[in-house]
Image (spheres, rainbow, N blue to C red):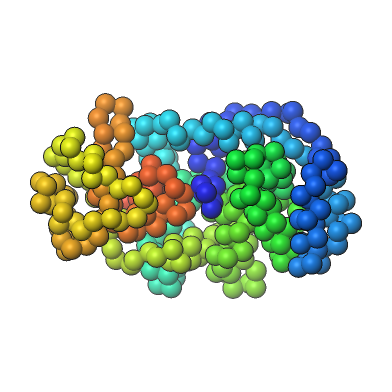
């Protein structure tokens, strides 16, 4: 997840190797760790000496900084992005995942209102249904970014603190938890703060386990979308055709709906389906290799962007989900 929740998505697929160049963390070089240790110790079973001993085993990984400074999504066209995630293998594996976990997905939809195809596609884009959850030690990733990445140090310092709180609450070995280069954890790639707030015990075993429990991952994704305003039964986005270049001035400026659909219809937009013309929407533009693609996005589209801010990501989740759903229905 980007911003609040980082994903493995592209970089986990494109990075072939991780640089062996690492540096042992020197606690004395980072005065802010003293404050962190005191704050964590006051709210957990950790003691300051225990945290000091823990961080003596933490490593600073320069490759993480390099990766953060050149995100693949920022320069990728929708044409290329789509080809990475909307593959026959990802669709067929998603359909198989759905069939295997149909009862849990149905239960999640009943409780949270989020359809199975969106939950499954999110897992497909994030971690290939749990097959690629990342091999960085989360504490190394978060410490590296909190201490050596000034542009986002405040954010990652909060996530580092949340990670320590999480390991205390769940009785986890902080040196054993692995995840993405940005510290995202488990099948759904939740950042520690999101893990603590939105993860649910959907397997009813008394513990929300996003690393090993598919049920908990399914329920937690549905919980996340629900808490961010998912509207059951409402569209995500629709392809708009016959769009003139002048439409660029109508593009959404923030990640939320900003005008009634009727305003676009009056300007000659053609949509694939009909809906109440007073419905709030936002016009988005996806750059292709040869020509752009315009889509009319509804509130649910922007809910997906709360998971990952990329418009490409949200569109991939939607369209992958639609393909998976069609595959599942075709076999019934």
Residue 308 visible somewhere in the drawing: yes
Residue 215 at what x, y percent from top left?
Answer: 54, 63
**What is the tally of numbered marks visible in this picture?**
0
Q: Is residue 174 left or right of residue 314?
A: right
Instruction: Assign the C terminus to one quadrant of the image.
Output: bottom left
Image quarter for residue 149? top right
Vertical placement of residue 150 versus 106, above or below: above
Residue 188 at what x, y percent from top left?
Answer: 54, 54
Q: Residue at x 65, y 73 (%)?
A: 206
Residue 141 visible somewhere in the drawing: no
Vertical placement of residue 32 versus 72, above or below: below
Residue 136 at what x, y percent from top left?
Answer: 68, 41
Q: Residue at x 28, y 63 (%)?
A: 234
Taking the view exactly as shown, the residue that stands out farthest to the top is 290
Q: Residue at x 34, y 55 (%)?
A: 256
Residue 219 at what x, y percent from top left?
Answer: 50, 65
Image quarter for residue 57? top right
Vertical placement of residue 283 versus 262, above or below: above
Q: Residue at x 17, y 37 (%)?
A: 246
């Amino acid at each position: 997840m980007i911003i609040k929740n980082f994903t493995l998505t592209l970089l986990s697929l494109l990075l072939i190797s991780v640089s062996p160049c690492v540096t042992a963390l020197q606690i004395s070089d980072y005065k802010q760790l003293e404050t962190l240790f005191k704050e964590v110790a006051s709210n957990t079973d950790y003691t300051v000496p225990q945290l000091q001993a823990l961080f003596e085993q933490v490593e600073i990984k320069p490759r993480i900084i390099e990766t953060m400074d050149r995100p693949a999504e920022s320069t990728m066209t929708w044409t290329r992005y789509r080809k990475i995630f909307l593959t026959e293998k990802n669709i067929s594996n998603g359909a198989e995942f759905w069939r295997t976990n149909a009862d849990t997905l149905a239960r999640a939809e009943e409780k949270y209102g989020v359809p199975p195809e969106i939950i499954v596609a999110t897992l497909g884009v994030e971690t290939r249904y749990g097959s690629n959850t990342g091999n960085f030690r989360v504490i190394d990733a978060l410490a590296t970014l909190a201490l050596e990445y000034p542009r986002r140090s405040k954010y990652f310092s909060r996530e580092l603190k949340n990670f320590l709180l999480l390991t205390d609450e769940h009785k986890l070995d902080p040196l054993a938890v692995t995840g993405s280069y940005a510290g995202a954890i488990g099948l759904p790639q939740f950042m520690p703060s999101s893990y603590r707030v939105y993860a649910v015990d959907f397997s009813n075993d008394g513990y929300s386990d996003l690393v090993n429990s598919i049920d908990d991952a399914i329920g937690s994704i549905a919980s996340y979308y629900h808490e961010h305003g998912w509207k059951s039964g409402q569209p995500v986005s629709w392809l708009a055709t016959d769009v003139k270049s002048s439409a660029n001035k109508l593009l959404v400026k923030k990640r939320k709906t900003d005008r009634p659909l009727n305003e676009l219809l009056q300007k000659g937009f053609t949509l694939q389906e009909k809906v109440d013309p007073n419905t709030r929407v936002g016009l988005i533009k996806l750059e292709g290799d040869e020509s752009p693609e315009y889509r009319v996005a509804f509130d649910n589209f922007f809910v997906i962007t709360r998971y990952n801010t990329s418009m490409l990501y949200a569109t991939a989740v939607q369209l992958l989900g639609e393909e998976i759903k069609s595959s599942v229905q075709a076999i019934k």
